[in-house]
Amino acid sequence: MFDSLSDRLGGVFDKLRGRGALKEQDVRDAMREVRIALLEADVALPVVRRFVDQVTEKAIGQSVLRSVTPGQQVVKIVNDALVEMLGGDTTPELDLNAAPPVVIMMVGLQGSGKTTSTAKISKFLKDKQGKKVLMASLDVNRPAAQEQLKVLGEQVGVATLPIIAGQQPTEIATRALQSAKLQAVDVLLLDTAGRLHVDQQLMDEMKAVSAISSPRETLLVVDSLTGQDAVNVAQSFSGEVDLTGVVLTRMDGDARGGAALSMRAVTGKPIKFAGTGEKPEAIEIFHPSRVANRILG
Ligand code: GDP
């Protein structure tokens, strides 16, 4: 992932590495390349500006120019700034500190990978954290949606709420909660309906489900391949519901990393998981420092 950005930044820093003492102009030239690399990676323009300004100021201010290894210092400053931009040093964990059943509400547009991610996170919680998990699909618009989650549930060995035709999303949510309580489930994942675009009906439905189920986590699933669009979607959703985090899917096919890089800065929401393939185990906890390292190569 991030090959092109990594290569580009690598080229810039190779040039700096080759120098002894740097001039202020060398730093500015390098930052121009960083700026182009970030824009090409589809990072949002205001984010790029802020990033480049910060890094330039630090690089020029921190006696980098007089240092014997100026290139390395600039690389470190850029690395630290990337980590910060991706969410900081700490790994954002799922917050499951509530009386069980702890509810995780999954939201997102159709095709973003929401249902797949619901199954992946359920499997993750079952296998890695020993949790008893129940999943329920509240998607009554797409006829096959509930069935799809059921099939995925069977694949990953996680129970799904039995399907009752004709129920509304809030009714299904209520039934899911009751069932989760009766079965002493630790974590209940609610897979809400997707839409092609953000619309009012979708938002109202999400709010109603949220009011009934009081989710501890509301995770927005977005497709990293859509770059800045993913960030725009995140912005629209976070204006309507209290998002607690983002799941960035298709990171396996994302060579640029623009969505990851702008997400935190634009939305203020941490990326909690990265989807890295179609298989149920293809999900990783998002580690800002690892991703920053990968970008710098
Ligand atoms: P939904 O409409 O948002 O529920 O989307 P789905 O969960 O049905 O996913 C749509 C397609 O994207 C499916 O074919 C998934 O296998 C695929 N998909 C989901 N997440 C990932 C991922 O992280 N990487 C890749 N390569 N494919 C994914």
Image (spheres, helix red, strand yellow):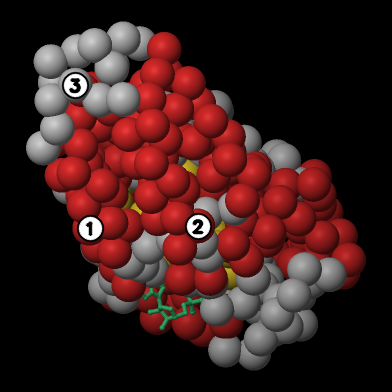
Q: CA distance from mark 3 to mark 2?
A: 28 Å
Label 1, label 2: how many angstroms apart (C-alpha)? 14 Å
User: Is 179 in front, or is 43?
Assistant: 43
Q: 95 left or right of 286? A: right
Q: Distance from label 3 to label 1 (Cα)?
A: 24 Å
Q: For the point 58% across and 40% down, which residue is it?
A: 49
Q: Residue 101: horizontal and vertical position, in percent?
A: 53, 40
| Circle 1 residue | 7
Residue topped by disc 3? 21
**Mark 2 residue crowding within 10 angstroms, few (<14) / some (14–19) / many (20+):** some
Closer to us: mark 3 or mark 2? 3
Where is residue 283 shown, x and y percent of the image? 30, 58
Which secondary structure lies at badge 3?
loop
Q: Earlier in the sequence, mark 1 or mark 2?
A: 1
Q: Which mark is residue 51?
A: none
Q: Is residue 70 left or right of residue 41?
A: left
SS state under label 2: helix
Q: Residue 99, percent across and down?
A: 55, 28
> What kind of residue is marked 2?
Leu
Q: Is mark 2 within 8 Å of ligand 1?
A: no
Q: Position of residue 156 (x, y in %)?
A: 29, 67
Q: Is tag 3's residue or tag 2's residue first in the polypeptide sequence?
A: 3
Mark 3 in CB contact with mark 2 (< 8 angstroms): no
